[in-house]
Amino acid sequence: MSPAPDTHKNLALDLPLRGTRLIEASAGTGKTFTIALLYVRLVLGHGQPAGESPGRDNGFSRTLVPPEILVVTFTEAASLELRDRIRHRLVEATEAFRAQEGDDLGERDPLLAQLRADFPPQTWPHCARRLELAAEWMDDAAISTIHSWAQRMLREHAFDSGRLFRQELVKDLTEPTLEAVADYWRTRVYPLDAAQAAALLALFPSPQRLYRDLRGLLQRDDASLVYAGEPLEGEDYRAPLARLGACGASLHASEVRAREAWARDAAQLNETLQDLRPRLNGTRFRGKNDDATFAGWLEELHRWGRGELSLKDTAFVKKLARSQLQLNQREEPPALPLFEHLDSWHRARTEADDLQQSLYPLVLADARDWVSRRLAEQLETRAQMSFDDMIRGLAEALEGPAGETLAERIRVQFPVAMIDEFQDTDPAQYRIFPAIYGVGNPAPGREPAADTAGVDDDTALILIGDPKQAIYGFRGGDIHTYLAARHATRGSHYSLDTNFRSSQAAVNAVNQLFLRAEETHERGAFRFARSGHAEDNPLPFHEVQARGRREQWLLRDQPVAALTGWLLPGDSDSGLLGKTDYLREAARHSANRIAGWLNLAAEGACGFGGPGEGAPTPLRARDIAILVRDRGEARAIREALAERGLASVYLSDRDSVFDSPEARDLLHWLRAMASPESVSTLRSALATATLGLSLSQLDLLQRDEAAWERAQEGFVGYRQRWQRQGVLPALRQLLHDYRVPEHLLAGPRGERRLTNLLHLAEWAQQASDALDGDHALVRLLAEHIEEPGQDEQILRLESDADLIQVVTIFKSKGLEYPVVVLPFICTFREVTAKSGRPLFHRGDMPLLELAPKKELARDSFEAADDERLAEEVRLLYVALTRARHATFLGLAALKTGTAKSAELHKSALGYLLAGSEKIDDLQALRGCWQRLGHSCRDIVLDDSDSRDIRYQLIPECVAKQPARSPSHRSFRPWWIASYSALQQRAGATPETFEAEVRDEEHRLNEPRAGIVAEQALPRPGSLHAFPRGPEPGTFLHGVLESLANAGFEQALGDAGLQEQLLERCRRRGWELHVPALQSGMRDWLTTPLAAEGEDGPTLESLRHYRAEPDFWFATTRASTADLDQRVSEGVFPGETRPALRRQQLNGLMKGFIDLLLEHEGCYYVIDWKSNWLGADDSAYQMPAMQRALLDKRYDLQLAIYLVALHRHLRHSLGADYDYERHVGGAMLVFLRGIRAPSRGVVRIKPPRAVVEAWDDCLAGESFAAGTVEERA
């Protein structure tokens, strides 16, 4: 057995963060927790050589920020969860480093306490600030799926990767692939002569048939093709096709000669056959003694002879070939010309069949290569890419001429990468990371480099996964690729071996089941130990420790065993059960037991608790998960549950709502709405099961013209509503008129069916927005129903009520449940010709077998079935590690077809119990399970009970839930508001500071109504003569931004700034204005920021300021009318100004402040304005600036900024905050008026009561809901 990876009690703190590391995390051992803490270490620079944590030297070479730490996983849901968990851990760490020494962190979070202790206390505030910034930066963190990251790399490094900057993502390759297949057909089939074309058409009658056979091969283009186990590379199909064409000609000639022979001797042949009739072999010629049958044979011979039948379509005539005409007593048939010619035809047919059998895989291999290339060319020509192209494109770029340059750029961009769920990788994905970070040699079948853990201390690659949970082979996941990576990283393996999910008993039971198989079976628990070489097992099972849960599942005050087998008896003495009977009995028994538990829970006799802890918490339906393989098993258990009054929900991530009966019924409704005058269309809609009309109601519509007209008028009304208001209101009116929800909810699966309808109605409304006309929506829905698997509209959960969860084992991976039931765990799916192309491996090389029958490639089929069983063992491991407390298995002596003994050894559970030995019957199964139980008291056997139990719902025992608020009391759009959005009719919010500046400059340079006086020309060389408009305004803001970034205190002496200003003006053709700008810069830096007659700081004297900070705060149902009134009363009251458009602020308020500064303990917000008020300084007197402020509603802008400042100071200063002492106010600075007596400054500082009134108004409902405590 290969050595166990290093185990560390505190691996998250001990793991070296340099080079390549492989972490194997068994189920429930805190993989995501570990990733989050490693992320915290990277942000802090923990263990950095010569860093601030002197006790360790295992960290990365420097501190990192979120955009530098790449975290890759394989699903969108997983990436979102990782982002949230890491953000939460950063926040927790921030709070820990802000606390004082001597707190209780060591008890609450020992690992975080140990991490903090590795840093000197004087550095804790600095660490806290770094962690806080990282948490705030998480929206920009490099956490994504591998596909989206690969796409990003191709786009960002387009030059080095040789890719286009923009490529359209094609999610469904069906149409492009069909096009490529059609091109192949035109290229390869059309030029053939008639005989060869006929031979090829016998194999593939159409391009669609060729596509059907190719589809699976194209999806696994990494696998080599074999036939009967032999590789097909380099073999050409043309030579056998030519021979097959010649055989076709020979067949035709033989049949012609045979038909001519029949024509010459037809009468004699009839006599000969009548004479041979008694001597014909009865097995070969079954029915020969029946006159009608024999007469039919002769009629077939005559029809063939007349040319009405082809020889290959006959049954009797083909048997007249001399070699096929079997007589009794081994008598030789007479030597007639017809028999001889038919024998020639048979020999040609046999040769043709052999050629056809060998030609089929050769054509497929040629077609796969040709179509793959053609498809790639098509996508490249159209600037498109598929999901696989993202991965393949990046891998090829890294292996191309500029590969090292690209790898270096990516290493600089992401010095550290963590790959989550690495066991689900595939060969193409694995090519990427070794090329970047240098992990040995990924090429299958080649010896990897030696230990690469220390290849580069300036990078780190951390691979995290659990090969025991590699269950996604059907999606392309390749455990052999994982094992190759494991071999390449040998010497750098670590493991998480403490289970935090399950009870001690549950962990013990799973340990015992797999350890016993590991120690007693020649190939180990997971079937990767080579026969006779158990010490060299790349996938061993290592015992897992349990952290342990104090809580237990108690049934009548007794702990329930962790692993229970329910033994299901069969009908015969041997106890065998066929699959259909097994599904029925296992579902019935499981449903009975669950009903019994819930009945006891209602009585207080079944629940979760601990010894001496009082009454247990009752078991609830949602605490129970039933894990199944597919929807067929889900249907069986849900029907059994429903029969006992138990409600359940089936959770699957692959079912499309367009594959439901409700989608087809909705199609009928929409057709009738679009064409209510069509009688047949309307009848189809009214007869749908979902509409729910009874037979008597339908009969009335048929007989009563008035009733028909009313129904027709109703659909005319739905069409009118559709055209006026949209399809969703029309459908809701139909549902109301026909009381559809009422009758659906009264029937079985009512919630499911109604949810599907509402989901489809919502989709129809969204889709119709992009379509022209009613019939376009009808066509689109019909297309989605035709191809439901191609759409992203996955079935939604019909209820969040207290329901039993029925979940596929695949979907359950990563989840946990208090109680798990595996009713059908004995089922298996043996690899056969019907189950698709056998996929297997030789070494690390994936192979696809093209032989259509097991008899032609027995070794290939057996190798594929061996891999199937190994993956099912891993699937069983996933299923058995989901439970916190207990797992229940439906055990049966399962057989298939007419087998005389059980075939349980072909299942994963059978393999774990008995290895390669057969479990022949029920008693053998009982013995295997009991032997397992003898070595572990947490494993028990329970014989099934034939009594049916119904769930008895006791209303007074049902916990009352709080009343739920309606989710849609009224239309409340959630949006992000800003000052700019409030000023615009469309309400669009600028997303960046630059966008907000440009937007504002557009508005402030609009002509002001009411100014009719003739304006003087500005003096050349002054700021008043500087160009006006959006671009110059944005330019002036950029100049001030440059001054702030350089530091106001040293900007005047910065020669680089002056040169930069000159260059920026040259690019715009503004060289004449450079002196005015340079003079203006000096004025802006040295003029006090204060209104006329007031004192204030200068920019060059500032030491504490921040340029362009953004802010966000929540608003809930705030009224702009109310806000407008309060701002008008608080800023220059009594003055006229444009009214705000009435709308509701519900979501977030967002903004960018030009400058936030602190001077002598007082905080100010400043907004720069480039407005041109007149030709000289006299235009910038207070009345003129006040009028400009009000006309442009800058009063609203300053009010919002003051509220943001008020909230920020209240939060950050806490009890020390004093508005009068800490808030200096908000200033508007007209940059062109800086030399005027007014200095171009308008400052407001309303009383605190006014600012709090604005705050309350913007808070809206969130204020009313309870922010009084925060305000206090």
Image: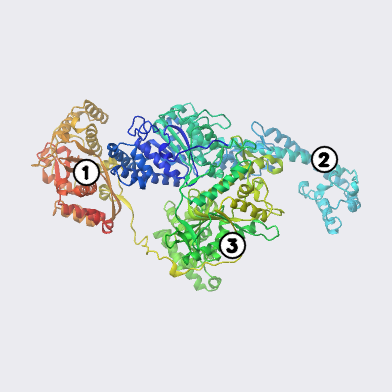
Q: Secondary structure at mark 2?
A: helix
Q: Amino acid at mark 3?
A: Arg
Residue at the far left: name it.
Answer: 1093
Q: Position of residue 92 (x, y in %)?
A: 34, 45
Image side of residue 354 versus residue 1240, left or right: right
Q: Secondary structure at mark 3?
A: helix
The amino acid type found where label 2 is placed reads Ser
Task: Please state the horizontal and vertical placement of residue 1229, each as a whole percent of the image.
Answer: 17, 41
- In percent of width and height, residue 567 lies at 62, 58
214 and 481: which is toward the camera: 481
Q: Which one is nearer the viewer's eye here, 125 or 792?
A: 125
Quadrant of the rendering where the N terminus is positioned: top right
Q: Quickly name the residue at label 1.
A: 1004
Q: Residue at x 52, y 55 (%)?
A: 886
User: Relative to the observer, which residue lies in front, 294 or 622?
Assistant: 622
Of labels 2 and 3, earlier in sequence is 2
Q: Which residue is mark 3?
A: 588
Residue 580 visible in image: yes
- Location of mark 2 (residue): 344
Nearest to viewer (mark 1 / mark 3): 3
